[in-house]
Amino acid sequence: MRPRWNLPLLLGGGGVAVLLLVGLLAPWLAPHDPMEQDLLAQNLPPFWSAARDPAYLLGTDSLGRDLLSRLIWGVRPALLVMLAGTSLSGGVGMLLGLVAGYLGGWADALVSRTVEVFMSFPPMLLAIVLAAVIGPGLNTVILAVALIGWTRFARVMRAETLKLREQDFVLAARLMAVGGGRILFGEILPNLTPIALALLSLEMGRAIVVEAVLAFIGFSSSDIPTWGGVVADGRDTFNQAWWVITSGMACILASVLLLNLLGDGLRRATQRGDE
Amino acid sequence: MTASTVLRRLLQALPTLFGVVLIIFVLLRVVPGDPISMMVTGESTPDDIARLRRAYGLDQPIPMQFALYLAALARGDFGTSITMKQDVLGLVLQRLPATLELALCAFVLATTTGMLAGLAAVRWRRHWPEAAVEGASAVALAIPEFLWALILVLALSVALPLFPSSGRVDPVVATAFHTQFYLLESLVTLQPHLAAELLSHLALPALALAIPLAAIIARVLRTALLEAMRQDYMLLAQVKGLSPNAALLRHALPNALIPTVTVAGVQVVLLLGGTVLVELIFAYPGLGNMLYRAAVNRDLPVIQGVTMVFSVLFVLLNLAVDLSYALLDPRIRQA
Amino acid sequence: MTPLLRVEQVRAALPGGRPVLRGVDLAVAAGEVHGLVGESGGGKTMLARAVAGVLPEGVRVTAGRIGFAGQDVLALPPRSRRALLGHSIAMILQNPSAALNPVLRVERQLAEVLRAQGRSRAEARDTALDWLERVQIRDPARVLGQYPHELSGGMCQRIVIAMAFACQPQLIIADEPTTALDVTVQLEVLRLIRQLQRESGVAVLFVTHDLGVVAKLCDRMSVLFAGRVLECGSVAEVFARPAHAYTAALLAAMPRYDEPERGLHPVPTALVEQLWADTAEADRAAAA
Ligand SMILES: Nc1ncnc2c1ncn2[C@@H]1O[C@H](COP(=O)(O)OP(=O)(O)O)[C@@H](O)[C@H]1O
Ligand SMILES: [Mg+2]
């Protein structure tokens, strides 16, 4: 007996939708310019404190910048990296995995070997090396997400395709001399959609963390507010303004949890369809 | 398990290492301009540049350059650091012990807590320990490692100043060591106060690294133990009159370790990779920090050196994980 | 004289509350080989495990008394109950390959029993070798160093048998010890159990669904159906004059190689269904 409502899907999907909206509407939602410094309003506490300033709902950081506005604007790079990075890693990884699993032979050997090579770099090392080579910036972060993530897509898709390849409907299609491309995209790919969706949302959560980490260590763009940047700013002033770093961390954690929830929900939803 | 099997697995890793070298080489060529452009200062003449290019073999065709590069690596020549003007291999090897000690501490911490938690969950199943272990591992895995590291710093170093938040050892103390394996040296030479000092610095970064591994070990071990408890050999152990503890430890545990190592082995490799990030957050002077510094300064030879060392460590660690299955499972050992 | 094992009106229920033993009575005298027969699913294994005190999780004895060597074992604290196992009571399981721990050498598994008897490590090894010889294992020194997956099912069962007899218990519960073995091996294992039993004089509760085995091996027998003993008596008596229709049907269903012209007479389905219907009715009456 399953509950009629898929709570993870609703919560995760709803949360991610809200994130998207906040990202799109950031210029209208943010009460202040996120870069504007007010040296007379440094380290102001959030609204529940007695020493609050009503103009700054969540308070300000050590340069007197409005925290709420920085967090709202920080949604944009997070979403951008998440969407662009996982599109790249998912696109490349899934395509290579499909091809490897479907063709087997030398194609499989080549892809599997490449995956192995990429997996013998620590993920953060890849990102740092990339930043060193092409310089910091959002593009670097997106590329890093892609470089780190594509192997997981490739491995899962390869394994799933191998399993599917031997199943009846694919064999039947082969017997009817359906072309390889049609089998791959017409028969196999639709069957992989559920697992691909779940994997994508998990990987999006990871992308958010990679973005935050690279911003934290200063390898993302320094011209725009980022959650990782907020965390880095707040780290040194924790004793004066604990709300800066904690609110940055809360944003990262919340979006990762929402994306994991969405992944769970998607898995559950598609499993139900199978039965 | 014979020496020849180990050798064969090592040889199988060679193509992977070759791929690693190739990727590093390609990444290097992607650099706008080439490595020389980062070495020259404003007053270098075109002649100087040409001389440098020749000295680094950059006037050769690309395949030739790759061959030269491979040959240099094979000689153990990783080049010279641009910023530190020292032999890269020496620099990297000097930093390696710090990272190894961190990873090892994290590993020991994670395996002991993970195993104890998994065993406790099964020994007292359907009671609060099982619920506690399940809940704790779910929370541990839901929070990304990056945030764990920050939470630990804020909670146990800033808010409650129990542990230092950065570094490896007090610089004054560091001069007392003869090797780079500070912790090992302090233990071997029986200097508990030094070991305590080192461990207090290691505590938070090691904990941050250990949390996900411990959670995974606890989870997988619990499932595997419950599976083992359903087997007939556990009934026979009971019938032999063994106490529940003895049956759990002597009969269920050796079986449950096999799937646990299979799943946790991947995570152990991730732990080693995680040192890069954790070293940055805790300003711990290991390879990760060296890499970061090199990346900021675009010191490419050092970046190559650190990358190579990590890849070799990964390959060795994967080998060790594979060998440990064979050690645990006689059915694999004799296959 | 009170029997070694006396089971009185024992009831047991599965996790969902479904009854699995419905008031079993059984008595096994010291030195007796007692056959427990019945169709599969009738609760033979549950009864055997209830006697040993090793019921599966969630299955519990809800009523009755189990007396062993003058003690009421159901009233014993868990620790004392466990102390009987490996000393006074031993068990041989149905599937020998699964009964041995796959990652431990034979020596360790056998020595575990011997060490519990208070033997030293060196003594335990010698005794283990000795026991492997007694269960007719060739090259015992080599087998001691092997793992279960390197041994045949018959070899594994001999080792499990050695473990049981090495405890020098008063009662061995053998739960279908030959069912999982090849026919040729079955006979050897049966002979082995019979021979070791004669030498030691231990009582054996021999669970089986094969009346032929009962005829060869047992002194007395009980017929179990749906968690109740339908009939009990000496093997000769029961075979000659079965008191219950179900026993008679079981006997008639036995393949008789001496009278092949008799053909096969399976237990009539109608009879089994009637018996189950009666059981269900009794369950409902008990629940009401
Ligand atoms: N581990 C168990 N947990 C719950 N029920 C069980 C278990 N093992 C067996 N049963 C149920 O108990 C009943 C009796 O089984 P069992 O004693 O194994 O019969 P037999 O040994 O006579 O074939 C069966 O209906 C079976 O479904
Ligand atoms: Mg049975």
Image: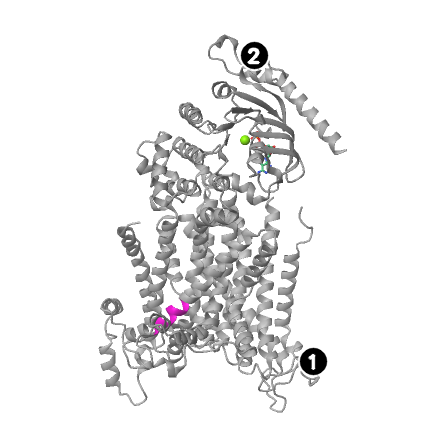
Inter-mark Cα distance, 2 to 1: 95 Å
Q: Quadrant of residue B51?
A: bottom left
Image position of C141 with respect to A90: above or below:
above
Q: Is residue B330 above or below residue B54?
A: above
* Magenta extent: B95-103
Which residue, as the protein is rendered here, is positioned at the far bottom? A40
Of B309 and B232, the residue lying toward us: B232
Count up the numbered dots: 2
Colour treatment of the image: one colour
The crowding category of the residue bearing disc 1, from other C-alpha atoms within 10 Å (few below 14, some 14 to 19, many at least 20), is some
Chain where mark 1 sits: A
Residue placed most toward the observer, C182 or A92 = C182
**Which element carries disc 2, helix, strand or loop?**
helix
Q: In this rendering, does residue B284 appear at all?
A: no
Looking at the rendered structure, the kind of residue marked 1 is Phe
The residue where tag 1 is placed is A47
* Kind of residue at disc 2: Ala
Q: Is residue B268 left or right of residue A262?
A: left
Q: Position of residue B119 (x, y in %)?
A: 51, 54
Mark 2 and mark 1 residues within 8 Å of each other at the beta carbon: no
Is B132 positioned to the left or the right of C187 in the image? right
